Image: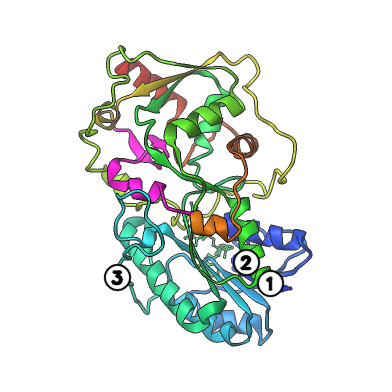
Amino acid sequence: MRILVLGGTVFLSHAVAVEALARGHRVSCLARGVSGSVPAGARLLVADRDSPGALAAAVGGESFDAVVDVATMSLPWVSEALAALAGAVAHWTFISSINVYADKATPGQGVDAPLLSPYVSSAGAATPAVDPDLYGAAKVASENAVLSALGERAFVVRAGLLVGPGDPHDRFGYWPARFSRGGRAIVPDALDQPLQYLDVRDLAAWVVSAAERGLGGVFDGAGPRRTLGEVLRGIASAVGGSVGEASADVPGVGGLPPDVPGVGGLPREASAVGGLPGEAEPDAPEPDAPEPDAPEPGGPAVGGPEGGAPALELVAASPSALLDAGVTPWAGPRSLPLWLPPTHHGFLSRDTSPALAAGLTARPLAASASDALAYERSLGLDRPRRAGLSAADEADLLTRLT
Ligand SMILES: NC(=O)c1ccc[n+]([C@@H]2O[C@H](COP(=O)([O-])OP(=O)(O)OC[C@H]3O[C@@H](n4cnc5c(N)ncnc54)[C@H](OP(=O)(O)O)[C@@H]3O)[C@@H](O)[C@H]2O)c1
Protein backbone atom coordinates (compact mmCIF):
# COMPACT_ATOMS: atom_id res chain seq x y z
CA MET A 1 0.00 0.00 0.00
CA ARG A 2 1.00 3.63 -0.46
CA ILE A 3 0.58 5.19 2.98
CA LEU A 4 0.85 8.88 3.77
CA VAL A 5 1.53 9.72 7.40
CA LEU A 6 0.81 13.35 8.23
CA GLY A 7 3.61 13.60 10.75
CA GLY A 8 6.19 10.84 11.04
CA THR A 9 8.99 12.59 12.90
CA VAL A 10 7.68 12.11 16.46
CA PHE A 11 6.43 9.33 18.74
CA LEU A 12 3.09 7.91 17.47
CA SER A 13 3.25 9.06 13.87
CA HIS A 14 6.88 7.90 13.72
CA ALA A 15 5.88 4.53 15.15
CA VAL A 16 3.13 4.22 12.51
CA ALA A 17 5.67 4.88 9.79
CA VAL A 18 8.07 2.32 11.30
CA GLU A 19 5.32 -0.30 11.47
CA ALA A 20 4.10 0.34 7.93
CA LEU A 21 7.64 0.08 6.55
CA ALA A 22 8.21 -3.17 8.46
CA ARG A 23 5.17 -4.61 6.70
CA GLY A 24 6.50 -3.66 3.29
CA HIS A 25 4.33 -0.63 2.56
CA ARG A 26 5.54 2.44 0.70
CA VAL A 27 5.54 5.21 3.27
CA SER A 28 5.54 8.95 2.78
CA CYS A 29 5.56 11.34 5.73
CA LEU A 30 4.50 14.96 5.56
CA ALA A 31 5.98 17.27 8.19
CA ARG A 32 8.29 20.23 8.55
CA GLY A 33 11.02 17.82 9.57
CA VAL A 34 12.10 19.92 12.53
CA SER A 35 11.10 17.66 15.43
CA GLY A 36 13.02 14.58 14.43
CA SER A 37 13.63 12.35 11.44
CA VAL A 38 11.34 10.08 9.53
CA PRO A 39 12.38 6.42 9.73
CA ALA A 40 14.85 5.08 7.21
CA GLY A 41 12.98 4.00 4.11
CA ALA A 42 10.26 6.63 4.39
CA ARG A 43 10.07 9.62 2.10
CA LEU A 44 9.68 13.06 3.71
CA LEU A 45 7.38 15.56 2.04
CA VAL A 46 8.31 18.88 3.62
CA ALA A 47 5.40 21.18 4.40
CA ASP A 48 4.34 23.53 7.15
CA ARG A 49 0.65 22.93 7.74
CA ASP A 50 0.33 26.40 9.21
CA SER A 51 1.00 27.72 5.74
CA PRO A 52 -2.20 27.51 3.65
CA GLY A 53 -1.70 25.46 0.49
CA ALA A 54 1.62 23.98 1.64
CA LEU A 55 0.25 20.47 2.14
CA ALA A 56 -1.40 20.33 -1.29
CA ALA A 57 1.74 21.68 -2.93
CA ALA A 58 3.93 19.08 -1.21
CA VAL A 59 1.61 16.23 -2.14
CA GLY A 60 1.46 17.51 -5.71
CA GLY A 61 -1.66 15.64 -6.77
CA GLU A 62 -0.25 12.25 -5.81
CA SER A 63 -2.81 9.79 -4.46
CA PHE A 64 -2.48 7.31 -1.61
CA ASP A 65 -4.25 4.16 -0.48
CA ALA A 66 -4.29 5.27 3.14
CA VAL A 67 -3.70 8.45 5.12
CA VAL A 68 -2.91 8.68 8.84
CA ASP A 69 -3.36 12.13 10.40
CA VAL A 70 -2.29 12.98 13.96
CA ALA A 71 -3.21 16.69 13.78
CA THR A 72 -3.43 17.73 17.38
CA MET A 73 -5.31 20.98 17.62
CA SER A 74 -6.08 22.37 14.24
CA LEU A 75 -9.30 21.93 12.31
CA PRO A 76 -7.84 23.98 9.43
CA TRP A 77 -5.00 21.44 9.11
CA VAL A 78 -7.53 18.61 8.98
CA SER A 79 -9.84 20.39 6.55
CA GLU A 80 -7.01 21.19 4.18
CA ALA A 81 -5.73 17.62 4.23
CA LEU A 82 -9.24 16.32 3.53
CA ALA A 83 -9.70 18.73 0.64
CA ALA A 84 -6.42 17.65 -0.93
CA LEU A 85 -6.55 13.90 -0.33
CA ALA A 86 -9.90 12.50 0.77
CA GLY A 87 -11.41 12.09 -2.68
CA ALA A 88 -8.98 9.44 -3.85
CA VAL A 89 -8.08 7.59 -0.67
CA ALA A 90 -9.45 4.21 0.45
CA HIS A 91 -8.82 4.60 4.18
CA TRP A 92 -8.23 7.51 6.55
CA THR A 93 -7.08 7.25 10.14
CA PHE A 94 -7.55 10.23 12.39
CA ILE A 95 -5.83 10.08 15.76
CA SER A 96 -8.11 11.75 18.24
CA SER A 97 -8.05 11.67 22.03
CA ILE A 98 -10.21 10.55 24.92
CA ASN A 99 -10.14 14.23 25.86
CA VAL A 100 -13.15 14.56 23.53
CA TYR A 101 -15.44 13.31 26.31
CA ALA A 102 -17.44 15.71 28.44
CA ASP A 103 -17.51 13.49 31.55
CA LYS A 104 -13.98 13.04 32.86
CA ALA A 105 -14.90 11.31 36.09
CA THR A 106 -17.17 8.32 35.45
CA PRO A 107 -15.28 5.03 34.91
CA GLY A 108 -16.21 2.53 32.24
CA GLN A 109 -17.60 4.83 29.57
CA GLY A 110 -17.57 3.90 25.88
CA VAL A 111 -17.50 5.79 22.60
CA ASP A 112 -21.18 6.74 22.85
CA ALA A 113 -20.54 8.92 25.92
CA PRO A 114 -21.34 12.64 25.48
CA LEU A 115 -18.69 14.74 23.78
CA LEU A 116 -17.54 18.29 24.26
CA SER A 117 -19.00 20.82 21.87
CA PRO A 118 -16.82 21.06 18.77
CA TYR A 119 -14.37 23.94 18.68
CA VAL A 120 -14.48 25.30 15.18
CA SER A 121 -11.82 27.84 14.40
CA SER A 122 -10.41 29.12 11.18
CA ALA A 123 -7.12 29.86 12.90
CA GLY A 124 -4.14 27.56 12.64
CA ALA A 125 -2.97 25.30 15.41
CA ALA A 126 -4.08 26.56 18.80
CA THR A 127 -1.95 26.09 21.88
CA PRO A 128 -3.38 23.12 23.70
CA ALA A 129 -1.38 23.28 26.88
CA VAL A 130 -3.35 26.21 28.23
CA ASP A 131 -6.85 24.78 27.85
CA PRO A 132 -7.53 21.06 28.02
CA ASP A 133 -11.15 21.41 26.98
CA LEU A 134 -10.09 23.33 23.91
CA TYR A 135 -7.86 20.41 22.98
CA GLY A 136 -10.74 17.96 23.29
CA ALA A 137 -13.18 20.29 21.55
CA ALA A 138 -10.79 20.82 18.64
CA LYS A 139 -10.46 17.05 18.31
CA VAL A 140 -14.28 16.76 18.19
CA ALA A 141 -14.44 19.28 15.36
CA SER A 142 -11.67 17.44 13.50
CA GLU A 143 -13.37 14.06 14.01
CA ASN A 144 -16.59 15.49 12.61
CA ALA A 145 -14.81 16.79 9.53
CA VAL A 146 -13.11 13.43 8.92
CA LEU A 147 -16.29 11.43 9.43
CA SER A 148 -18.27 13.78 7.21
CA ALA A 149 -15.73 13.55 4.38
CA LEU A 150 -14.85 9.85 4.60
CA GLY A 151 -17.89 8.10 6.09
CA GLU A 152 -17.15 4.38 6.44
CA ARG A 153 -13.62 4.88 5.15
CA ALA A 154 -12.80 6.80 8.34
CA PHE A 155 -11.06 5.15 11.28
CA VAL A 156 -11.13 7.47 14.27
CA VAL A 157 -9.05 6.41 17.24
CA ARG A 158 -9.52 8.28 20.51
CA ALA A 159 -6.19 7.53 22.09
CA GLY A 160 -5.66 7.33 25.81
CA LEU A 161 -2.31 7.57 27.55
CA LEU A 162 0.43 6.43 25.17
CA VAL A 163 3.76 5.17 26.43
CA GLY A 164 6.88 3.63 25.00
CA PRO A 165 10.14 4.45 23.24
CA GLY A 166 10.19 7.97 21.87
CA ASP A 167 7.67 9.28 24.40
CA PRO A 168 8.37 13.02 24.55
CA HIS A 169 6.35 13.51 27.73
CA ASP A 170 8.53 11.73 30.33
CA ARG A 171 5.52 10.41 32.27
CA PHE A 172 5.44 6.60 32.18
CA GLY A 173 9.22 6.47 31.81
CA TYR A 174 9.69 8.21 35.14
CA TRP A 175 8.73 5.07 37.01
CA PRO A 176 11.06 2.51 35.43
CA ALA A 177 13.83 5.11 35.57
CA ARG A 178 13.17 5.82 39.22
CA PHE A 179 12.70 2.21 40.28
CA SER A 180 15.88 1.11 38.54
CA ARG A 181 17.79 3.22 41.04
CA GLY A 182 16.32 1.38 44.02
CA GLY A 183 16.07 2.89 47.51
CA ARG A 184 13.03 4.63 48.97
CA ALA A 185 10.75 5.78 46.15
CA ILE A 186 7.73 7.97 46.88
CA VAL A 187 4.50 6.79 45.27
CA PRO A 188 1.05 8.33 45.74
CA ASP A 189 -1.11 6.44 48.20
CA ALA A 190 -3.77 6.10 45.51
CA LEU A 191 -2.85 2.64 44.35
CA ASP A 192 -6.48 1.70 43.68
CA GLN A 193 -6.75 4.48 41.13
CA PRO A 194 -7.74 3.14 37.70
CA LEU A 195 -5.04 3.37 35.07
CA GLN A 196 -4.94 2.56 31.38
CA TYR A 197 -2.04 3.05 29.06
CA LEU A 198 -1.20 1.71 25.63
CA ASP A 199 2.24 1.09 24.20
CA VAL A 200 2.64 3.37 21.20
CA ARG A 201 3.88 0.44 19.09
CA ASP A 202 0.67 -1.48 19.78
CA LEU A 203 -1.45 1.45 18.67
CA ALA A 204 0.74 1.87 15.58
CA ALA A 205 0.29 -1.81 14.71
CA TRP A 206 -3.48 -1.50 15.02
CA VAL A 207 -3.56 1.64 12.86
CA VAL A 208 -1.61 -0.06 10.08
CA SER A 209 -3.76 -3.20 10.35
CA ALA A 210 -6.89 -1.06 10.14
CA ALA A 211 -5.62 0.50 6.93
CA GLU A 212 -4.81 -2.93 5.49
CA ARG A 213 -8.23 -4.30 6.43
CA GLY A 214 -10.24 -1.19 5.62
CA LEU A 215 -11.53 -1.04 9.19
CA GLY A 216 -13.78 1.95 9.80
CA GLY A 217 -15.51 3.37 12.84
CA VAL A 218 -14.83 5.29 16.03
CA PHE A 219 -12.91 3.57 18.84
CA ASP A 220 -11.24 4.35 22.12
CA GLY A 221 -7.61 3.32 21.71
CA ALA A 222 -6.59 2.51 25.26
CA GLY A 223 -4.97 -0.44 26.95
CA PRO A 224 -6.22 -2.94 29.54
CA ARG A 225 -7.95 -1.57 32.61
CA ARG A 226 -5.54 -1.77 35.52
CA THR A 227 -4.88 0.09 38.74
CA LEU A 228 -2.01 2.41 39.49
CA GLY A 229 -0.80 -0.11 42.04
CA GLU A 230 -0.73 -2.95 39.51
CA VAL A 231 1.20 -0.82 37.07
CA LEU A 232 3.73 0.49 39.59
CA ARG A 233 4.36 -2.92 41.13
CA GLY A 234 4.61 -4.45 37.65
CA ILE A 235 7.14 -1.85 36.59
CA ALA A 236 9.07 -2.33 39.82
CA SER A 237 9.33 -6.06 39.37
CA ALA A 238 10.22 -5.65 35.67
CA VAL A 239 13.10 -3.30 36.35
CA GLY A 240 14.00 -3.41 40.00
CA GLY A 241 13.91 -6.90 41.43
CA SER A 242 12.43 -7.29 44.91
CA VAL A 243 10.11 -4.61 46.21
CA GLY A 244 9.25 -3.60 49.75
CA GLU A 245 6.43 -1.29 50.75
CA ALA A 246 6.46 1.17 53.61
CA SER A 247 4.20 0.56 56.59
CA ALA A 248 1.20 2.85 56.89
CA ASP A 249 2.05 4.06 60.39
CA VAL A 250 4.70 6.45 59.15
CA PRO A 251 3.36 10.02 59.52
CA GLY A 252 2.10 11.34 56.21
CA VAL A 253 2.48 7.96 54.60
CA GLY A 254 -0.25 5.50 53.79
CA GLY A 255 -3.88 5.70 54.86
CA LEU A 256 -5.52 7.19 51.79
CA PRO A 257 -8.46 9.28 53.00
CA PRO A 258 -11.73 8.12 51.45
CA ASP A 259 -12.45 11.42 49.73
CA VAL A 260 -8.88 12.39 48.97
CA PRO A 261 -9.26 15.89 50.43
CA GLY A 262 -7.48 18.57 48.52
CA VAL A 263 -7.24 16.57 45.32
CA GLY A 264 -10.50 17.72 43.76
CA GLY A 265 -9.01 21.05 42.91
CA LEU A 266 -6.02 20.14 40.81
CA PRO A 267 -3.12 22.54 40.99
CA ARG A 268 -3.28 24.84 38.02
CA GLU A 269 -0.25 23.31 36.35
CA ALA A 270 -1.99 19.96 36.24
CA SER A 271 -5.50 21.02 35.34
CA ALA A 272 -4.22 23.39 32.71
CA VAL A 273 -3.04 20.58 30.52
CA GLY A 274 -6.13 18.53 30.39
CA GLY A 275 -7.61 15.24 31.34
CA LEU A 276 -4.77 13.47 29.74
CA PRO A 277 -2.64 16.42 30.57
CA GLY A 278 0.36 16.95 28.47
CA GLU A 279 -0.06 14.70 25.46
CA ALA A 280 -1.04 17.66 23.36
CA GLU A 281 1.94 19.73 24.30
CA PRO A 282 3.56 20.86 21.09
CA ASP A 283 7.08 20.79 22.47
CA ALA A 284 9.79 19.35 20.32
CA PRO A 285 11.82 16.50 21.79
CA GLU A 286 15.07 17.32 23.49
CA PRO A 287 17.57 18.30 20.79
CA ASP A 288 19.89 15.47 21.68
CA ALA A 289 17.16 12.84 21.84
CA PRO A 290 18.05 9.70 19.94
CA GLU A 291 15.89 8.26 17.22
CA PRO A 292 12.65 7.40 18.99
CA ASP A 293 12.25 3.95 17.53
CA ALA A 294 15.11 2.48 19.56
CA PRO A 295 15.03 -0.13 20.96
CA GLU A 296 13.37 -2.26 18.34
CA PRO A 297 10.25 -4.17 19.33
CA GLY A 298 11.14 -7.65 20.41
CA GLY A 299 14.66 -6.64 21.27
CA PRO A 300 16.43 -7.96 24.30
CA ALA A 301 15.00 -7.14 27.68
CA VAL A 302 17.04 -4.43 29.33
CA GLY A 303 15.41 -4.30 32.72
CA GLY A 304 17.29 -4.60 35.94
CA PRO A 305 18.43 -2.26 38.65
CA GLU A 306 21.45 -0.08 38.32
CA GLY A 307 24.60 -1.86 39.43
CA GLY A 308 24.78 -1.91 43.21
CA ALA A 309 21.42 -0.17 43.63
CA PRO A 310 19.84 -0.62 47.07
CA ALA A 311 16.65 -2.65 47.33
CA LEU A 312 13.60 -0.73 46.18
CA GLU A 313 11.05 0.36 48.75
CA LEU A 314 7.78 2.00 47.67
CA VAL A 315 6.84 4.69 50.17
CA ALA A 316 3.17 5.57 49.78
CA ALA A 317 2.47 9.21 50.65
CA SER A 318 -1.04 10.53 51.08
CA PRO A 319 -2.37 12.62 48.18
CA SER A 320 -3.23 15.50 50.49
CA ALA A 321 0.29 15.56 51.95
CA LEU A 322 1.76 15.46 48.46
CA LEU A 323 -0.42 18.30 47.25
CA ASP A 324 0.39 20.35 50.34
CA ALA A 325 4.05 19.80 49.55
CA GLY A 326 3.57 21.16 46.03
CA VAL A 327 3.67 17.84 44.20
CA THR A 328 1.60 17.87 41.01
CA PRO A 329 -0.42 14.89 39.78
CA TRP A 330 0.00 13.40 36.32
CA ALA A 331 2.78 15.39 34.66
CA GLY A 332 5.08 18.35 34.77
CA PRO A 333 7.99 19.32 36.99
CA ARG A 334 7.82 18.13 40.62
CA SER A 335 5.05 15.68 39.75
CA LEU A 336 4.20 12.07 40.39
CA PRO A 337 3.29 10.94 36.88
CA LEU A 338 0.18 8.86 36.14
CA TRP A 339 -1.46 9.83 39.45
CA LEU A 340 -4.81 11.54 38.88
CA PRO A 341 -7.60 12.49 41.27
CA PRO A 342 -11.08 10.90 41.15
CA THR A 343 -12.35 13.88 39.16
CA HIS A 344 -10.36 12.45 36.23
CA HIS A 345 -10.74 8.70 36.66
CA GLY A 346 -13.01 8.48 33.62
CA PHE A 347 -9.93 9.12 31.52
CA LEU A 348 -8.21 6.07 32.88
CA SER A 349 -10.89 3.42 32.67
CA ARG A 350 -12.47 3.47 29.22
CA ASP A 351 -14.41 0.46 27.94
CA THR A 352 -12.10 -0.77 25.22
CA SER A 353 -13.87 -4.05 24.46
CA PRO A 354 -14.91 -2.78 20.98
CA ALA A 355 -11.28 -1.96 20.17
CA LEU A 356 -10.08 -5.34 21.41
CA ALA A 357 -12.78 -7.06 19.33
CA ALA A 358 -11.57 -5.03 16.34
CA GLY A 359 -7.99 -6.22 16.66
CA LEU A 360 -6.20 -3.97 19.15
CA THR A 361 -3.67 -5.92 21.19
CA ALA A 362 -1.46 -4.83 24.08
CA ARG A 363 1.97 -6.19 24.89
CA PRO A 364 2.79 -7.20 28.48
CA LEU A 365 3.50 -4.51 31.03
CA ALA A 366 6.98 -5.92 31.64
CA ALA A 367 7.89 -5.41 27.97
CA SER A 368 6.73 -1.79 27.95
CA ALA A 369 8.51 -1.16 31.25
CA SER A 370 11.85 -2.63 30.21
CA ASP A 371 11.76 -0.88 26.81
CA ALA A 372 10.84 2.40 28.50
CA LEU A 373 13.82 1.94 30.83
CA ALA A 374 16.11 1.36 27.85
CA TYR A 375 14.80 4.56 26.27
CA GLU A 376 15.24 6.44 29.54
CA ARG A 377 18.83 5.24 29.81
CA SER A 378 19.50 6.32 26.24
CA LEU A 379 18.30 9.83 27.17
CA GLY A 380 20.20 9.82 30.48
CA LEU A 381 18.57 9.06 33.81
CA ASP A 382 19.91 12.23 35.38
CA ARG A 383 18.67 14.65 32.72
CA PRO A 384 16.20 17.39 33.66
CA ARG A 385 12.79 15.75 33.23
CA ARG A 386 9.52 17.06 31.87
CA ALA A 387 7.64 14.95 34.39
CA GLY A 388 8.49 13.45 37.75
CA LEU A 389 10.49 14.30 40.82
CA SER A 390 14.16 15.14 40.71
CA ALA A 391 16.33 13.13 43.10
CA ALA A 392 16.70 16.26 45.24
CA ASP A 393 12.93 16.86 45.32
CA GLU A 394 12.27 13.28 46.30
CA ALA A 395 14.90 13.33 49.05
CA ASP A 396 13.38 16.55 50.38
CA LEU A 397 9.88 15.05 50.34
CA LEU A 398 11.03 11.89 52.09
CA THR A 399 12.49 14.05 54.84
CA ARG A 400 9.37 16.19 55.14
CA LEU A 401 6.72 13.50 54.79
CA THR A 402 8.22 10.61 56.70
N1 LIG B 1 0.86 10.98 23.86
C1 LIG B 1 -0.31 10.65 24.36
O1 LIG B 1 -0.39 10.11 25.47
C2 LIG B 1 -1.57 10.91 23.55
C3 LIG B 1 -2.78 10.64 24.16
C4 LIG B 1 -3.96 10.85 23.43
C5 LIG B 1 -3.89 11.31 22.12
N2 LIG B 1 -2.70 11.59 21.58
C6 LIG B 1 -2.67 12.05 20.19
O2 LIG B 1 -1.73 11.27 19.50
C7 LIG B 1 -1.14 12.06 18.48
C8 LIG B 1 0.36 12.11 18.75
O3 LIG B 1 1.01 12.26 17.60
P1 LIG B 1 2.61 12.14 17.57
O4 LIG B 1 3.05 11.23 18.61
O5 LIG B 1 3.02 11.88 16.20
O6 LIG B 1 3.08 13.53 18.09
P2 LIG B 1 2.80 14.97 17.66
O7 LIG B 1 3.57 15.85 18.58
O8 LIG B 1 1.34 15.21 17.59
O9 LIG B 1 3.52 15.02 16.20
C9 LIG B 1 2.91 15.46 15.21
C10 LIG B 1 3.70 15.49 13.90
O10 LIG B 1 3.23 16.69 13.34
C11 LIG B 1 4.31 17.35 12.72
N3 LIG B 1 4.05 18.77 12.75
C12 LIG B 1 4.02 19.58 13.82
N4 LIG B 1 3.78 20.84 13.43
C13 LIG B 1 3.66 20.82 12.07
C14 LIG B 1 3.40 21.80 11.08
N5 LIG B 1 3.23 23.09 11.39
N6 LIG B 1 3.34 21.41 9.80
C15 LIG B 1 3.53 20.11 9.46
N7 LIG B 1 3.75 19.13 10.35
C16 LIG B 1 3.82 19.49 11.64
C17 LIG B 1 5.52 16.98 13.53
O11 LIG B 1 6.67 17.04 12.70
P3 LIG B 1 7.59 18.37 12.55
O12 LIG B 1 7.58 19.07 13.87
O13 LIG B 1 8.92 17.80 12.18
O14 LIG B 1 6.98 19.19 11.48
C18 LIG B 1 5.21 15.54 13.96
O15 LIG B 1 5.75 14.64 13.01
C19 LIG B 1 -1.79 13.41 18.53
O16 LIG B 1 -2.91 13.42 17.68
C20 LIG B 1 -2.26 13.49 19.97
O17 LIG B 1 -3.33 14.38 20.10
C21 LIG B 1 -1.53 11.40 22.25
Question: At x 21% / y 35%, what residue is drawn?
Answer: 262
Question: At x 27% / y 14%, what residue is drawn?
Answer: 251
The residue at which mark 1 appears reads as 3
Circle 3: is it few (<14), some (14-19), or many (20+) Cα within 10 Å? some
Q: Secondary structure at mark 1?
A: strand
The span picked out in magenta is 326-352
Q: Is residue 289 above or below residue 71?
A: above
Tag of residue 117: 3
Amino acid on which the number 3 mark rests in the picture: Ser
Q: Is residue 34 above or below residue 278?
A: below
Choose the circle earlier in sequence order: 2 or 1.
1
Please tell me whether residue 335 belongs to the stretch shown in magenta.
yes
Choose the circle earlier in sequence order: 2 or 3.
3
Circle 1: is it few (<14), some (14-19), or many (20+) Cα within 10 Å? many
296 or 166: nearer the viewer: 296
Amino acid on which the number 1 mark rests in the picture: Ile
Choose the circle earlier in sequence order: 1 or 3.
1
Position of residue 138 measured from the top left corner of the image (x, y, whole percent) = 38, 69
Q: CA distance from mark 2 to mark 3?
A: 28 Å
Tag of residue 210: 2
Amino acid on which the number 2 mark rests in the picture: Ala
Q: Secondary structure at mark 3?
A: loop
Q: Is residue 309 left or right of residue 353?
A: right
181 or 232: nearer the viewer: 232
